[in-house]
Amino acid sequence: MTSPWAPPEVAAEVETDWRKLSPKMLLVHPLNEVVRALPGLLAILVVGASTGRGPWWTLFGVGLLVVLGVLRWFTTTYRVTPQQVQIRKGLLRKQVLTVATDRVRTVDIDAQALHRVLGLAAVTVGTGRSDKGHEGIKLDALTAEEAQRLRDELLHRSPVTTTETPTAAETSQSPETPLAALDPRWIRFGPFTLSGLVTVGVIGAALSRVLSESEGNLERFGPLRVIFRHLENAPLAQDIAEIVGALAVVVVVASTVGYVLAYWNFRLSRHQSGTLHIARGLINKRSTTIEERRLRGVEVSEPLLLRLVRGAKLLAITTGLRVGHGAERGGTVLLPPAPREEAVRVAVLVGSPEPLGADLVQHGPQARRRRYTRAFVGAAVVIGLVFLLWAMDVVTLGVALSSLAVLPIAAALAFDRYRNLGHAVVGPALVSRHGSLVRRRVVLSRDGIVGWNLRRSFFQRRAGLATLTATTAAGNQHYSVPDVETAEALRVADELLPGLIEQFLVPSAEKTQ
């Protein structure tokens, strides 16, 4: 066997050999195919029950999926060269997916429950392109040791070792500095994320579909029959209160369980080669590695309920990870919901302390007026619709009058939205804060800004305001400073990227001619 420290030409020759995924995937791929097709298999079983052939058709479908899963392993190979990572797959339609090693931005290692039992992991190699369909390539799956070695090679630019466990010398040469770790006390923030709403909705939709397909009757179940009879005999107000209360308990429990499953064993560390390592997960373990030189800023996110208990979540603004996709799955999460002070502390460790503690410039009375106008117009529409329903005898007068409670809620929302509105230029960074239901403080580095978008609606022009949007290749790809005075927006844009917008401005002398 060639030494991992052989000359480059020898190592390159070894790495050009096509290799297969771990043979243990013969146990995982078929099972994954069956799980994905489970709703369809259940539908076949129910529909075929009338002819007595439902179990046979279902068994045939399972067998077909198992064969497809096995073929997927036999037809998938990969190789790593000093220049490229390549995957070759397909039986009738051959495909070769290629990623240049110098385009690798992130490496995700994901180990689901069955993967962990078998000592496997799925590796996703992310590139700077974050548009749909170009999110990198995935190797599902390698041994856990091979996955770690591949990550080190691609992001740390070190040779792939062939030993099963790293030596003491190798460990001392690549130390990691811990930046943050999950404190069990943070679990108290789980219920305030309301992530359980999605879980409850998905489970409810799945049960509804199964019952619809099987023509099931819930009243046949004893406990449910008792609940339905209780709701029929109780007053409507009591029914609503009990249903809302029960749903709140379920959402709180589901949110807490989801928090534990997603973020248990969370750990953020920095490697000496200039990468950030994020590991998390109780059953499904996931590890993400981000090059710090690709980090363009941070975002402190404070949803309303989380803000009430002084909590926040920290996200990374980095190239190669889409916030809409990565954040939901934890790809850009530098810190899960935790005390706000902890989020600020971690943000300082990966960035700079000045932008996070800087005083922001308020946006003036015109911006305040726009927020109150929007809030009250929306409230007036809601109240008008409710009173229209009362005039049509759809709702009672009491319900119509209770809709007036929307007015103080709208006023409080407008007040909070204006109070959270602000911006600043601190050194080489743009700081923007806005939002109420979800308050966000974004720190975007000047190096990450590639252009400006200055938008003025009809009402903004009348108020002398504009929305300044910084375009970037990282994160959401655009970050805005809403309802700022036009002169201030131009000043901010010119200060961060001098000379970029001068060609689009008309001198005052020319305006008077």
Image (cartoon, grey):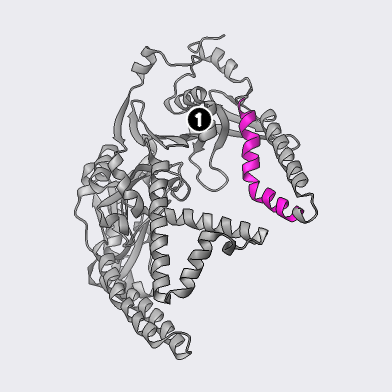
The kind of secondary structure the magenta stretch mainly shows is helix
The correct choice, above or below, for 319 with respect to 171 in the image is: below
- Tell me the quarter of the picture where residue 208 sits: bottom right
Name the residue at 61% across, 29% down.
Answer: 25
Q: Residues within 10 Å of mark 1 (few under 14, many from 20)?
A: some
Instruction: Provide residue 301's location: percent of width, then percent of height.
Output: 33, 52
Report the side of 268 relative to 226 (left or right).
Answer: left
The question of residue 100 being in magenta is answered with no
Instruction: Provide residue 476's location: percent of width, then percent of height.
Output: 42, 51
Can the viewer see residue 443? no
Name the residue at 48% across, 11% down.
Answer: 5
Instruction: Provide residue 268's location: percent of width, then percent of height.
Output: 34, 35
Q: Nearer the viewer, residue 164 or 390?
A: 390
Report the side of 59 relative to 453 (left or right).
Answer: right
Magenta-drawn segment: 24-48
Q: Amino acid at mark 1?
A: Arg
Name the residue at 49% across, 19% down.
Answer: 160
Name the residue at 42% across, 37% down.
Answer: 282
Can the viewer see residue 213? yes
The correct choice, above or below, for 461 with respect to 504 in the image is: below
Q: Secondary structure at mark 1?
A: helix
The correct choice, above or below, for 54 with respect to 294 in the image is: below
The correct choice, above or below, for 148 with respect to 493 in the image is: above
The question of residue 34 being in magenta is answered with yes
| Image quarter (top left, top right, bottom left or bottom right) of the N terminus | top right
Residue denoted by label 1: 116
- Tell me the quarter of the picture where residue 332 sits: top left
Report the side of 338 relative to 59 (left or right).
Answer: left
Q: Nearer the viewer, residue 53 or 499?
A: 53
